[in-house]
Image: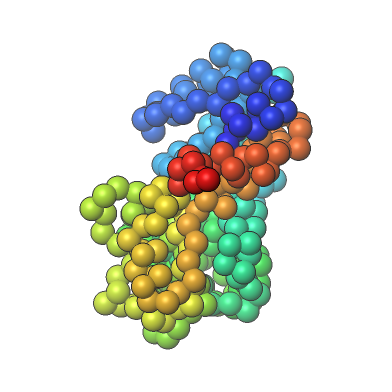
Amino acid sequence: MHNAGFAALGLNWCYVACEVDPKNLRAAIAGARAMGFAGINLTVPHKLLALDMVDALDASAKKWGAVNTIHFNEHGATGFNTDADAIITSLREDLKAGLPGAKVLLLGAGGAGRTAALKLASEGIAELFLVNRTPSKAEEIAGEIKKQFPSVKVSTGYPKGSVDLVLNATSLGLKPGDVSPLDQKQFTLAQTRAVYDMIYRPAETPLLQSARDAGCKTANGLGMLLYQGAKAFEIWTGRAAPIEVMRRALVENIYGPAKS
């Protein structure tokens, strides 16, 4: 999507993917700056690690506690978070989700999960249930929400009753053979109306397939990917992102060329 956007604006820029071991992240950030990169994106597991590896944090990174975008300038490396606004935009656009007063089950408490939890709380949801493989991480986020958003009822573990939305912020579903991030012995998909999976490749994870079979409204993370990318594009270039050009490039990349 970025290369399509650069081409549309006539920019002689190129976006490339690089796999970096977490232990080499600091060196990779310094190397990218030394090589004249305008900036970089970070994905799991780097979003929390990078908080301590940049020269400055934008208000967005400070507020949501994770860095997914870095911009290099004469002052050094500045960390941003473009995920938070993107997930809300996608939930409203793709699921027509009404968040104020909603009950949400959030799976995952890593960088993306933490950002989603805090942003959902800021949108005025009524109740948030946090489930994570390591319970202490979910408890830590719950404590932050209780301090920052005391009107939101937050707890760890699965709800006893129904919720309006289940949101997967784990990486389970990325690889063939992954187990479901949802323990249906503790919570069934009949207990929700909508399921959002941040994973966008494959286009339909086993969780989303099960949700569709259960009659839920479903959406994958394509919209979130688009909108966080568009904001990063604008941070790096100082130009308005060509959203529809970028959307078409994403859809073609993930779903294949449109059939005539």
Most extreme residue toward the bottom is: 161
Q: Is residue 24 above or below residue 95?
A: above
Asked where in the image residue 249 lies, by quadrant, the reply is top right
Left or right of 6 on screen, residue 116 = left
Left or right of 23 on screen, residue 53 = right
How far across and down, in percent of the image, does residue 29 sit?
52, 25
Asked where in the image residue 209 lies, by quadrant, the reply is bottom left
How far across and down, in percent of the image, does residue 259 sit?
49, 46
Q: Is residue 36 above or below residue 250?
A: above
How far across and down, in percent of the image, does residue 147 sit?
60, 66
Residue 86 visible, this orientation: yes
Left or right of 179 on screen, residue 92 = right
Residue 71 visible, this orientation: no
Most extreme residue toward the top is: 35
How far across and down, in percent of the image, does residue 186 sit?
30, 77
Q: Is residue 85 above or below residue 229?
A: below
Q: Is residue 146 above or below residue 90?
A: below
Most extreme residue toward the left is: 177
Residue at the image point whose x is 61% and y is 15% from the top: 36
What colour scheme has been applied to the protein in the rendered image? rainbow
Residue at the image point whose x is 63% and y is 64% from the top: 92
Image quarter (top left, top right, bottom left or bottom right) of the N terminus: top right
Left or right of 1 on screen, residue 254 = left
Residue at the image point whose x is 51% and y is 18% from the top: 31
